[in-house]
Structure formats: C-alpha cells, structure tokens
Image: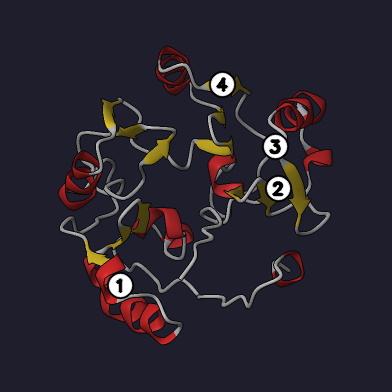
Amino acid sequence: MLAPHFQEQVFFIEMPEIQTVLYPLRRHADMGIHMTPKGLVIEPSIFDAMNHKLLSIGVCASQIYKGEAELSPQYPKDIAYNCLAIGNYFFYHAQADPKIIALYKASGFSMISVKQGYVKCSTLGVGQNAVITEDLNLYRAFTAANIETLLIPKGDILLEGFEYGFIGGTGGFYNKSLFLNGSLKHHSNQLEILNFIKEQGTDIIELHEEQLNDCGSIFIFDS
C-alpha cells in the first residue's frame, strides 16, 4: 500500500510481538520503538529481532539502540517508548525510557514532561510544527510550546479489544505527506481535520477506504 507513493526502494518491516503488553497492542510499533534524531530505540525483548531486520536492509548499526526499559501490561509500565518529538520539543512521561531521554537531551531538544503516558498514541503529527490530539492536557502543553494543535473528541477510530483507538496510532507523517490507515470520511470531525491538515500544506494519503484503525502508528525512516 505504501510502496507506490515512493520513488526509491521501500522495505517493509513486520513488528515483532512484545509479549509483555496487552495482546491487542503487541505488534504496535509505538509501544516498543521510538525514532530519535540519532536513531531507533528498541524495547529489549524485541531488540534482537528488530536489530537483525534493520541491519539486513542497510540501517547502520550506530543508528540502532537497545532501550533500557522493559515493558509490562500495567499502565504506566507500558509507556516507556510512547513519546513524541515535534519541532525542537520532546514530550514525554516520567516513565519514559532513560536511553530515549538521554538521546534527546544530547540533541539539544527542549524537554517537556507531561501527565499523559500515551503521548504518541494520543497525537498525530501532520506537519513540521502541527499536531492533532484527543487529549486536553497534551493540547495545553502543545499550544504552550507554540505548536499548531487541533483538539478533537475521542472516538470514531477502531482498535481491537478496546472501545476506541487513538488518532496518533492511525498514521505517520513523512516528507510533507500524511499516511493514514483508513479514511477520514468515517470520522465525525472529518471536515475540521481535513482543513487543518491542508492548512499545513500536507498531502493526505489514505491507504484504504475503511474506518480509521489504530495500528500503532506508521513509522517511515531513511536507512
């Protein structure tokens, strides 16, 4: 589904199961992987499998880091990798992985601690300095940092085993394009979301026509 939208060769990596989190979330990339400016930080239990896959497609070993935090099903012990960088700001919960925090500090980011543990799940980046979120406290933190933010109500997003999913888990932003796992036409706030994204000069690429589905985010990176 993604390949036709790229001129260069594309490799797809299947997310290994994180056995220590709730079953519906075990293959959610945003639960066990975080992309920092210096490379990927990976949860210890899936590190070997992911490291092998990444090296096999040409990712440099110096860009692959083993995280320190091991996950468990109980919140907030499952949120260590669920952080977000936007602009020059890094938003994270106190239980975030120490390796991730250290890499952002070393990169000169402004560090902002927030109460919401599922920062990435709750937030969809739609531009270099623009996000959509369903969380009021995150909305306040983003706007205080002068990040353009659209607050939408929870719901209208599928997630197996849960009443609803989260907007951040439905897609990924890359090179002025937003890739979505589903179609906005099924969302109650469709027009508001579409207008906000278009204001950022971002192209919307819907990978299928069904309802938006929280798949644990779409991560796209250059090897």
Which mark is first along the chain, 3 or 4?
A: 4
> Mark 4 highlights which residue?
148
Asked if labels 2 and 3 touch by Cβ distance under 8 angstroms, the answer is yes
Asked if labels 3 and 4 touch by Cβ distance under 8 angstroms, the answer is no
> Mark 2 highlights which residue?
212
Q: Is residue 12 left or right of residue 182?
A: left
Label 4 SS: strand
The image quarter containing residue 66 is: bottom left
Which numbered circle lies on residue 85? none
Which mark is first along the chain, 2 or 3?
A: 3
Residue 88: give x, y in percent of width and height. Answer: 37, 32
Q: CA distance from mark 3 to mark 2?
A: 7 Å
Residue 166 visible in rendering = no
> Which label sits in the foreground, 3 or 2?
2
- Circle 2 Cα neighbour tier, 10 Å, few/some/many (<14 / 14–19 / ≥20): many
In front of the other: 192 or 145: 145
- The residue type indicated by label 2 comes to Leu
